[in-house]
Amino acid sequence: MDLGLAGKKAFVMGSTGGMGEGIARRLSAEGASVMISGRSIEKGLALAAEIGNANFCYLDLSKQESIDEAMKIIGSEFGYLDILVCNGGGPPPGPIASVDTQLWMAQFETMFTNQVKILNAYLPQMRERKWGRVLVVSSSGIQQPIPNLGISNAIRAAQVGWAKTLAGEVAADGVTVNICAPGRIHTDRVNGIDEAAAERLGRDIEDVRAESRATIPMARYGKVEEFADTAVFLLSTNASYITGSIIRVDGGMIRGV
């Protein structure tokens, strides 16, 4: 299937590893020009050289100067964007009752405000060109809150309200806005969550992983490539009539309809 992505210009936040990297690789394979970003310069440069048709810019979503510099690089290299993927590392696990105000503010800025700031810089061009794709990489916690990940559950819920509202505002201009909600996709982030759970519960990590897999009808963690295939379809020309939607990639883990 031709996804109509050849020549499209894409910026993927948090793409030096995990699901962001998977999306960047798949976009490049489809012929899009991809701006990889993240906090690991070494990984970013190596990935850009490996997959081809890609550039790298350093991006730390917690630092305004980094965001401003990244947008300058995007402007000089691409001029405009057709595709923007909002993605970033998750917040630390822990009981939600013990989160202090400063941590809430810092995480909200990184996970929400600064991602919106970047999108708002390129959204007018998408609307003028009558074509654009925005994808928010979220979490299954937006539909079934995950124990011990209260910060993520709360802030990602804010992303949902924003994305759904925005989708209605820009749909007539040919811009789609969707959310891709991964379940247990096997990434370093998921490894970290499993390790934290094992430590908190005083259990062997393999037992924790086995118990987690048992909650998934497919009885396994998902592959990054499986998630990326779904995400890139939503970014394609073929998905032109899908907007304001939450698409789960979770192996049937979420029990709600």
Image (cartoon, rainbow, N blue to C red):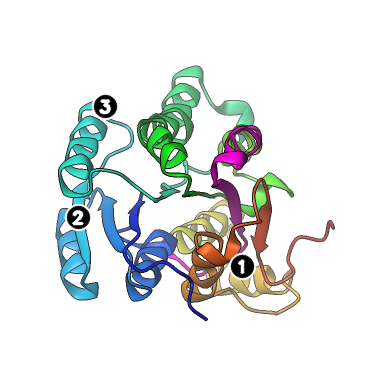
> Disc 1 or 3, which lies upstream in sequence?
3
Q: Residue furthest front?
A: 129
Residue in the image at 51% along x and 54% along y:
196
- Mark 3 Cα shell of 10 Å, populated few (<14), some (14-19), many (≥20): few
Count of numbered badges drawn on the protein: 3
Residue in the image at 22% along x and 63% along y:
54
* Magenta stretch bounds: 165-188
211 versus 17 height, above or below:
below
Q: CA distance from mark 1 to mark 2?
A: 36 Å
For residue 77, side relative to residue 205 (left or right): left
Residue marked by disc 2: 56
Residue in the image at 59% along x and 74% along y:
221
The x and y percentages for residue 168 are 66, 36
Pointers 3 and 2 in contact (CB under 8 A)?
Answer: no
For residue 85, side relative to residue 204 (left or right): left
Q: Amino acid at mark 2?
A: Phe
Q: Secondary structure at mark 2?
A: strand
251 versus 242 height, above or below:
below
Q: CA distance from mark 3 to mark 2?
A: 18 Å
> Disc 1 or 2, which lies upstream in sequence?
2
**In the image, which is nearer the foreground, mark 1 or mark 2?**
2
Q: Amino acid at mark 3?
A: Gln
Task: Tell me, for residue 64, which label it has, or none.
Answer: 3
Residue marked by disc 1: 208
Q: Amino acid at mark 1?
A: Val
